[in-house]
Image (tube, rainbow, N blue to C red):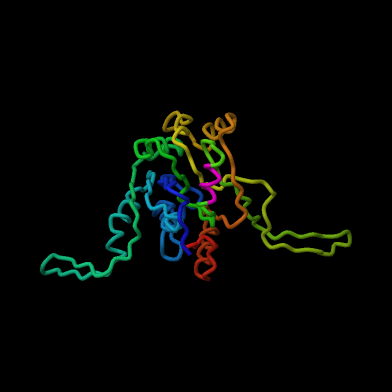
């Protein structure tokens, strides 16, 4: 099922894709974390497919660590998604059918050691004076972007953040005074706290809260936006998952392989 953006409120999506991914170094020694595969496709592709399903087809990908992997992936994307005949004797190629998405992708090198805030600010020339979407290159969700954008528009705040309650890692038991288990819940919500879900709608003025390349977006910018009453959260109670460990990779691939991936809204 396809969804379409409300009215004419069509946005670019910035994707943070430059971190070192040290918590899953078994994979990131070889490739950047957004290129770790789920079902034979990079997690970055899954994120972009989800945005595209809501009519968001223009992306600015903020590169850093091993950014050339991502550049090479997209520079060859048209070929990989097409049926072609290659005539080596004539040094020519004929494209028969192209299955590429209608994406416009800007690949922006934001520096190897630049922090998340600095990476966002380096995209200033591409953001201009327009509202924009923002997310990380390692998270998946079934968030309805239409509703997130509409919530942001009505709030009139500079930044809307998705808020999620991640599942606990272990099953939960209810035990009575006779040591009998009266209830068992497999992987319930964690401790009940809401956390940053990593899907944002932003106004360009948030760049004024970012000082330099060394600014961590999740620290002073978000803290000061909250102090100024310019940060609002939209709670999401559906699926949310991230690629932080081999356990996460296995889990996300199992969902995909069993055709039970909640983020597959296309």
Please give the range of residues in magenta: 147-153
Q: Is residue 118 above or below residue 197?
A: above
For the image shown, how many numbered marks are present on the structure? 0
Q: Indicate left or right for 87 with 66 as reference.
A: left
Q: Nearer the viewer, residue 40 or 58?
A: 58
Q: Determine the residue positioned at 82% across, 64% down.
A: 182
Q: Is residue 17 visible?
A: no
- Seen at 52% across and 42% down, the residue is 153
| Of residues 166 and 7, the one drawn nearer to the viewer in this rendering | 7
Q: Is 249 above or below relative to 194? A: below
* Residue 219 falls within the magenta-colored stretch: no
> In the drawing, does residue 52 fall left or right of residue 89?
right
Residue 43 appears in the picture as rendered: yes
Q: Residue 85: where, in percent of width, then height? A: 20, 71
State whether residue 11 is above or below residue 38. Answer: above
Question: In this orientation, which residue lies closer to the viewer: 53 or 125?
Answer: 53
Please tell me whether the stretch drawn in magenta is mainly helix, strand or loop.
Answer: helix
Q: Quadrant of residue 176?
A: bottom right
Residue at (49% x, 43% y) in the render: 201
Q: Position of residue 21 (x, y in %)?
A: 46, 48
Q: Measuring from the top left, give residue 165's x and y in whole percent.
A: 63, 51
The residue lying furthest to the left in this view is: 90
From the viewer's perspective, is 171 left or right of 13?
Answer: right
Q: Name the outermost residue toward the front.
A: 7
Q: Position of residue 207 (x, y in %)?
A: 44, 33
């Amino acid at each position: 099922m396809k969804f379409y953006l409300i009215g004419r409120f069509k946005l670019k999506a910035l994707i943070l894709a430059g971190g070192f991914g040290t918590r899953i170094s078994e994979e990131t020694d070889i490739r950047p974390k957004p290129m770790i595969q789920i079902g034979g496709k990079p997690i970055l592709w899954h994120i972009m497919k989800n945005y595209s399903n809501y009519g968001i087809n223009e992306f600015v990908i903020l590169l850093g660590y091993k950014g050339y992997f991502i550049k090479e992936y997209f520079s060859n994307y048209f070929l990989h998604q097409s049926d072609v005949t290659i005539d080596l004797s004539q040094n020519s190629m004929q494209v028969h059918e192209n299955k590429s998405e209608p994406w416009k992708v800007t690949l922006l090198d934001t520096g190897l050691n630049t922090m998340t805030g600095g990476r966002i600010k380096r995209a200033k020339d591409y953001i201009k004076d327009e509202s924009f979407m923002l997310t990380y290159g390692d998270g998946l969700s079934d968030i309805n972007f239409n509703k997130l954008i509409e919530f942001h528009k009505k709030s009139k705040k500079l930044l809307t953040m998705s808020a999620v309650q991640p599942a606990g890692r272990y099953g939960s038991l209810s035990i009575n005074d006779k040591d009998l288990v009266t209830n068992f819940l497999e992987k319930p919500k964690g401790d009940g706290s809401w956390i940053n879900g990593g899907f944002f709608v932003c106004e360009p003025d948030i760049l004024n809260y970012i000082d330099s390349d060394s600014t961590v977006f999740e620290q002073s910018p978000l803290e000061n936006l909250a102090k100024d009453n310019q940060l609002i959260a939209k709670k999401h109670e559906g699926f949310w998952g991230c690629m932080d460990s081999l356990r996460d990779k296995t889990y996300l691939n199992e969902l995909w392989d069993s055709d039970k991936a909640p983020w597959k809204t296309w």
